[in-house]
Amino acid sequence: MRVHVVEDDAGVSDSLALILRNIGHTVISHRDAESLFKGSVPEAPDAVIVDLSLPGIPGAQLVRWLLNLAAPPRVVVITGQSQGFIDHQLRGLVPDGVMRKPLDVDAIARVLPPL
Amino acid sequence: MKDFAPPSDAPHPPTVSEARLLSVLDTAADGIIVIDEHARILIFNKACEKMFGVTTAEAVGQNVKLVMPTEYARDHDAYVGSYIRTGVKKIIGIGREVQGRHADGTVFPLELSVGEAATPEGRQFIGILRDLRPRKESEQRLADLQSELVHLARVSAIDEMGAAIAHELNQPLTALMLYLQAIRRAHSRGIDIVTVVGDILDKAANEAERAGHIIQRMRQFVEKRDPERHVRPLDPLIDEAIDLTLLGQRHRIRIIRQTGESLPPVSVDPVQIQQIVVNLVRNAIEAAASVPDPAIQIRTLASEGSVRLEVQDNGPGIAPEALSKLFEAFASSKRRGMGLGLAISRTIAQNHGGDLLVDPGGNGRGACFTLVLPAAPVPDEVG
């Protein structure tokens, strides 16, 4: 599966890419929503992992945009913020998964199973 | 006074009898010592007996060195001699803080003022003494309480930033865990990772270090320490404090940082000054949160023997009704926190000989807080 990772923290982004490749996915990393928009539009059966707290365009806005695409990819939200913050940001949005940091490989493999 | 002076041809005015004079001296709360030109004690009142543990009978006739610690006593005769010869006043007419010595050997601070009287028996010196220990003790108590409160406000600030700091710690922990799990996974599947494992472990170690730094920065800030003074350049302190404040703030705010050129150093308690910066920057971020392009400008500049730090936000400004209570403790308009921040920040600034000022802005302008600190005195050049 092709997985886009939209995460501005270099350490998290790099380690996430490593583990995703490790479980057999192809990874495309983006620092922010803007740089994702510059590439080709992700579509099913791709997956997009979105950090909720992004610089520039907020993560929740990106999630909304992705879910409204004609052929929406799988969307997985990652965040280190509180449940209150998550609920507030995601009002009305239902992504395919929400993972709270710190992440672990089992949780990732459950949401994005290896092919 | 002149108007009340008796005409010179009038009969002698009634004089106060010596007995009455002594009883007046003995009711005085302050210690009173009268000495002659040879520093011999002529009068030693009741308050002095208590202060020095020496009776009047023992004291009268002795050199006043009796109630001085050795280092003062050694030079005292020379002082008196020098004044009588040269007329240069070192203490007469000027109050100053000196040390006294109790009969039991205790040395204690005294406020001493000395007057001089010419008498038919020669020149006499009148010393009025006040034990400074009670005042020093209450000053110390006040300083201790204040430093407790300053510390409390720091702890409270970190407490309020708790969620943001937890988030910031989550990042390196996430990365660390994923790096280690990647190695674990490869290892358990018998994948050859020899060529990459060193690289991954280095990255993992870096992430652990990053988590450690966050903890360290926080700990330095909340740890309780005695107030101190160091001569430091202001800008690095400010930058560190900005980093601390931005932990977990996640970039939604633009920080415009301008550093002044050739700023003189300041003599400060570094953590307390950072406490002010953290407070001002947090307030500014909060104030600017409601506008579409939140930004704060943080700049330093030198001005007339002082160094200024300005923190300007682009929020709505401070409402006139809030302005009068802005620096009062526990008067916060915010839902969270104790409302100590600005009150404590101003106290810290004033303890440093500076001040914390506000331009409330409004009508499309944000508020601007200015911390003023005196430039550290330039050390005397050697030689």
Image (spheres, coloured by chain):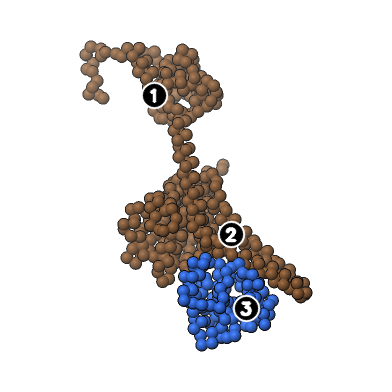
Return the residue found at the far bottom.
A70
- Looking at numbered disc 2 in the image, what kind of residue is underneath it? Ile
Q: Are dots 1 and 2 in contact, CB under 8 Å?
A: no
Split into 4 quadrants, where in the image is the N terminus of chain B? top left
Nearest the camera: A63 or B378? A63
> Which residue is located at x 49 percent, y 57 percent?
B160
Q: CA distance from mark 1 to mark 2?
A: 57 Å
- Which residue is denoted by mark 2 in the rendering? B214
Residue located beneath label 1 in the image: B29
Q: Are marks 1 and 3 in contact (CB under 8 Å)?
A: no
Q: Is residue B49 left or right of residue A36?
A: left
Q: Same chain for the residues at labels 1 and 3, yes or no?
A: no
The residue lying at 49 percent from left, 66 percent from top is A84
Q: Mark 2 vs mark 3: give the one in front.
A: 3
- The answer to whether residue B343 is above or below residue A85 is above
Task: Evaluate whether label 2 is on the same chain as label 3.
Answer: no
Residue B185: x, y in percent?
72, 72
* Quadrant for the C terminus of chain B in the image: top right
Q: Which residue is mark 3?
A: A112
